[in-house]
Image (cartoon, rainbow, N blue to C red):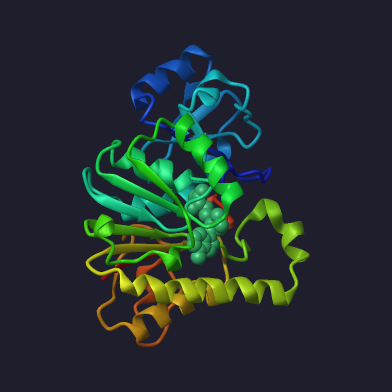
């Protein structure tokens, strides 16, 4: 689920959890612990150094070999291992404080706690996931991260009723469905074991999901995957736009140079892609719809 970058060549990204600390306090704590802040290329960061990511707020970049799992700042939930690509979804959705938000495929909750941090624990966050075991992990993760504005719903997102009064104020939805995971560099070997049938099944799921988020009106919707396959990314976006004239694509992070693959008659280059060689992250895709 792109929780952590594990590939030896990719930098280690740690998100400062602003629900338990502040960015300034974190920098002071790290410096006190012998880490020095540097302003250099991601690939040149040495051990005991870190830099501040230029694109995502509250994201720190470390040397690939950095291991802070035993560190108090990790144990107390102030630092969260999260690949930069994985941080893009909540960053792009960018829910305003006090809004109501659904995280439709939430477990184990990395993006949920990021959303809660952006909302500063205000408003309402519904974290939906159909997998009971993963929901249990999410419960622990959200507690550790001091998330207080969240209601966990252990259900299939498809089974939620968009007209249920409790969802009437929902303005933002994050859809981060199960996918082939083909963008995850550290899982290359595992991916090679994927049979075509299995990949196709997962593709079908993401296509299915996109159909259902039509039902939710007046929403900003982020659709993201950790896949590099066009079938799971631009093709899904194209079908969504084709089937619903009320859906509009919004330009994601205009300064980001790695754009979605162009498709005739569809503005899929408004979406963004991540590529290990270009962006020093795992492979990823983000689309932003307005409904
Ligand atoms: N967003 C998560 C994070 O950042 O930690 C990772 C989500 S993972 C890629 C996909 C999740 O979607 C899985 O936990 C899976 O159980 C869930 N899922 C897949 N289809 C679903 C559905 N129809 N309704 C609810 N959850 C679903």
Q: In which quadrant of the rendered view does residue 162 lie?
A: bottom left
- Residue drawn at (35%, 34%), measured in percent from left and top? 148
Q: Position of residue 286 (x, y in %)?
A: 43, 62
Residue 154 seen in the figure: yes
Q: Position of residue 274 (x, y in %)?
A: 50, 59
Q: In the visual, does 196 lie left or right of 155? A: right
Depicted 240 relative to depicted 36: above or below: below
Depicted 55 relative to depicted 238: above or below: above
Residue 273 seen in the figure: no
Extreme-front residue of the structure = 164
Q: In the visual, does 274 lie left or right of 113? A: right
Task: Looking at the picture, tell me which residue is in the foreground, 254 or 85.
Answer: 85
- Residue drawn at (71%, 77%), measured in percent from left and top? 197
Quadrant location of the C terminus in the rendered image: bottom left
Q: In the visual, does 85 lie left or right of 118? A: right
- Residue drawn at (74%, 67%), measured in percent from left and top? 194
Task: Looking at the picture, tell me which residue is in the foreground, 63 or 210.
Answer: 210
How many marks on residues? 0
- Residue drawn at (55%, 24%), measured in percent from left and top? 75
Q: Position of residue 244 (x, y in %)?
A: 31, 82
Q: In the visual, does 159 lie left or right of 203? A: left
Q: Position of residue 105 (x, y in %)?
A: 48, 57
Q: In which quadrant of the rendered view does residue 92 lie?
A: bottom left
Depicted 236 relative to depicted 49: above or below: below
Task: Looking at the picture, tell me which residue is in the foreground, 157 or 285.
Answer: 157
């Amino acid at each position: 689920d792109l929780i952590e970058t594990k590939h030896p060549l990719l930098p280690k990204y740690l998100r400062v959890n602003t629900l338990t600390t502040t960015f300034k306090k974190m920098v002071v704590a790290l410096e006190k612990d012998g880490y020095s802040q540097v302003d250099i290329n991601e690939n040149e960061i040495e051990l005991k150094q870190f830099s501040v990511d230029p694109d995502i707020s509250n994201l720190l970049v470390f040397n690939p070999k950095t291991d802070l799992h035993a560190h108090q700042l990790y144990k107390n939930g102030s630092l969260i291992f999260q690949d930069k690509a994985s941080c893009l979804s909540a960053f792009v959705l960018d829910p305003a404080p006090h809004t109501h938000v659904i995280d439709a495929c939430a477990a184990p909750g990395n993006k949920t706690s990021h959303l809660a941090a952006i909302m500063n624990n205000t408003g309402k966050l519904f974290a939906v996931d159909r997998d009971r075991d993963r929901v249990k992990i999410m419960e622990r993760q959200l507690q550790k991260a001091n998330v207080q504005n969240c209601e966990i719903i252990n259900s299939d997102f498809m089974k939620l009723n968009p007209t249920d009064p409790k969802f009437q104020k929902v303005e933002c939805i994050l859809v981060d469905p199960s996918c082939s995971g083909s963008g995850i560099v550290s899982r290359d070997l595992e991916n090679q074991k994927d049979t075509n049938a299995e990949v196709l099944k997962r593709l079908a799921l993401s296509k299915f999901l996109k159909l259902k988020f039509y039902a939710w009106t007046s929403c900003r919707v982020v659709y993201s995957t950790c896949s590099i396959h066009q079938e799971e990314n631009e093709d899904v976006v194209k079908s969504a736009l084709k089937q619903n004239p009320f859906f509009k694509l919004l330009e994601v992070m205009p300064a980001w140079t790695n754009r979605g693959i162009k498709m005739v008659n569809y503005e899929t280059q408004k979406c963004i892609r991540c590529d290990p060689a270009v962006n020093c992250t795992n492979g990823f895709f983000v689309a932003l719809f307005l409904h």
